[in-house]
Image (spheres, helix red, strand yellow):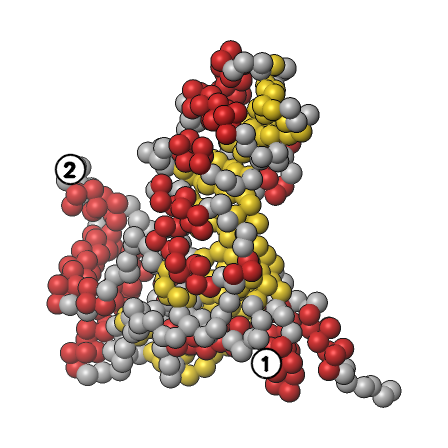
Amino acid sequence: MNTLPLQYQSLKAVLLYMDPNVRFKISHRLPSISSTEKVVPLRIEELDLGDLTTTVNQTTYKLGIYREYKEGEKITFRTQRYNDFGGFPRDFDRFGFEIFPGHNVLNPGDVSLPCPYNLVSQEERDTVQIERMYKTRLTFYEDVLESRLGSEKIEIPNGEDDDAIMKRYYLSLPIKELERHIGEIQEDLQPFECRRFNLKPPFVCYIMLTINSKSHKQVSRIPYNMKLHEAMKALNGFLFGGRRQSIQVQKLQFAINETILRLPIGFKIKLEQLKGLNNLAMRNGAILSMLDKKSFPLKSVSFFASDETDFQFLDVGKTTSLTAMDVNLEIDIFSILKTLSNQRAYLNFYHSDLRILQYLGLVQSWIENERPIGTCYSFGIVEENTARQILKVVRANVERAKRSKRCVSIPIRSSARLEMYYIPMESLNDSEQEEFMWFYDWVLKMRVVRF
C-alpha cells in the first residue's frame, strides 16, 4: 500500500491540535519535522515549572543524578530510593560531596523565583565540624545496635533530657532500621575519606531523565558531563526553545521553594490562569517577565496570601478573578477588598471566619461605590450559624434590605440590587470548589445583579 507524507500545510494543521507531549516525542525522533513543529503554536492546558522538573499537562520531565555502584559495593536504602524516583536532586563533586554549581548564576533566559527560604550552602556540608557530627552519630548508632545485639534485657533510660529521649527512641527501633541508619551515616562520611586519600567514590554518576505520565514511565541516562542546571537548560530549550510565537497556556504554576527556572531565551507565555502562587510579592517581576502582554487581563490568579503586598500583584485589577488562599489573619483583608476592582474573588482564611461586622462594612462599601453588575465575591464559611448571623446583621443595619431564608437582597440603584446569600459547598460546580483549599461546609456569596 502506497502512503504519501503529509504536506506542509496539512502537517501544521495536525500539529496544532496534537497533544504537546506527542509533539515533543515526534520532534525528537523525526528531526526533519522539528523546524515545522517549532513554527506551529504550542498549546498547553497545564504547565508547572520547577528547578529540575517541567510538567506539561499530566506528563512530568524530571532530572536527577543516578548513582550506579560498582560490583560488590552495597547501596543504601536511601540512595536506592533516589535512584528509583528520579535521581538525586543536586550535583556531586569528584569525591561525592553535594555541590551547587551555578545555583545563583542567571544565564540569558533564566528566571529567578525568590522566596524567604534558602538552600543549605555547600560550605555547610563538607566541613570538619560536619564530619565530626557524622562520626558522633555513627558512634551513637553503633552503641545502640551493640546494646540491642549484646543483651536480652536492655536498660532503657527514663530521663527527660534530650539524650535520654533520643536513646529511648533508637532503642525501640527494629534492628534492620538501626543498620539502615548506620549505613547511611557511613555513606555520609565516605566523601570525607575519598577527599582525605584522593580516592574516587564507589559509584559512577549519570544524568537521569524520567518522563512520567499517567500510563507510562520512561527512563534515560546519559554520561555526567554537564551539571544539572545545564541539563535542565538543555531540556527546556528542547521543549520550548526556538518558537516563533508565545506558548499558549491555560494554567501555570511554579515550585514553592526558591528556584531558578532554566528557560530558553525568548521564552514567553500567553496565559489564562496563574494557580497556587507562593511568595507572590517577591516573585512579581519575575512572573511578569515571562508573560506575553496579550495575556492581560488574566482570567484568574490564585495565591497564598501571607502579606498585604501580595495583593498588589499585576495591580490585581488586571485579572478577572482573584483567589486568595490561607489569608493571614494579620492582613486587613476587608480594607483591601473595598479597593479591589476584580469582577470575581474567592477568599478562604487560615483556621477562622472573619468578624461579622466586617461583612457589614463591605456591604456598605459596595452600596456607596456602586460596584458593577456581575461582581461576585465568595467567602468560605465553617459554621452555618455564622452565615445566618451575617445575614441577620446586614438585614438589621441596611435600609431597604429584605431577607429570605438564606438571602438578603438590597436595591442599590434603579437597575441593580446587591444579594448576599449562602449555599452548601457541595452545591458549587467543580471549578468553584477548586478555589477553596480548606474543608468549608458553606460558601457566603455577595453579588451585584440586574433587577
Residue 172 percent coordinates (x, y): 28, 46
Is there a contact, CB below 8 Å, between mark 1 and mark 2? no
> The C terminus lies in which quarter of the figure?
top right
Instruction: Name the residue at 44% across, 20% down.
Output: 356
Residue placed most toward the observer, 170 or 337: 337
Residue 319 percent coordinates (x, y): 52, 48
Per the image, label 1 sits on a secondary structure element best described as helix
Is there any visible trace of residue 72 in the rendered image? no
Instruction: Name the residue at 55% across, 45% down.
Output: 320
Per the image, label 2 sits on a secondary structure element best described as loop
Residue 144 percent coordinates (x, y): 21, 53
User: Relative to 349, is 295 above or below?
Assistant: below
Q: Residue furthest front?
A: 414
Q: Residue furthest right?
A: 1
Residue placed most toward the observer, 356 or 245: 245
Dot label at residue 159: 2
Residue 407 percent coordinates (x, y): 61, 20
Q: Earlier in the sequence, mark 1 or mark 2?
A: 1
Q: Residues within 10 Å of mark 1 (few under 14, many from 20)?
A: some
User: Relative to 345, is 246 above or below?
Assistant: below
User: Relative to 216, is 447 above or below?
Assistant: above
> Mark 1 highlights which residue?
28
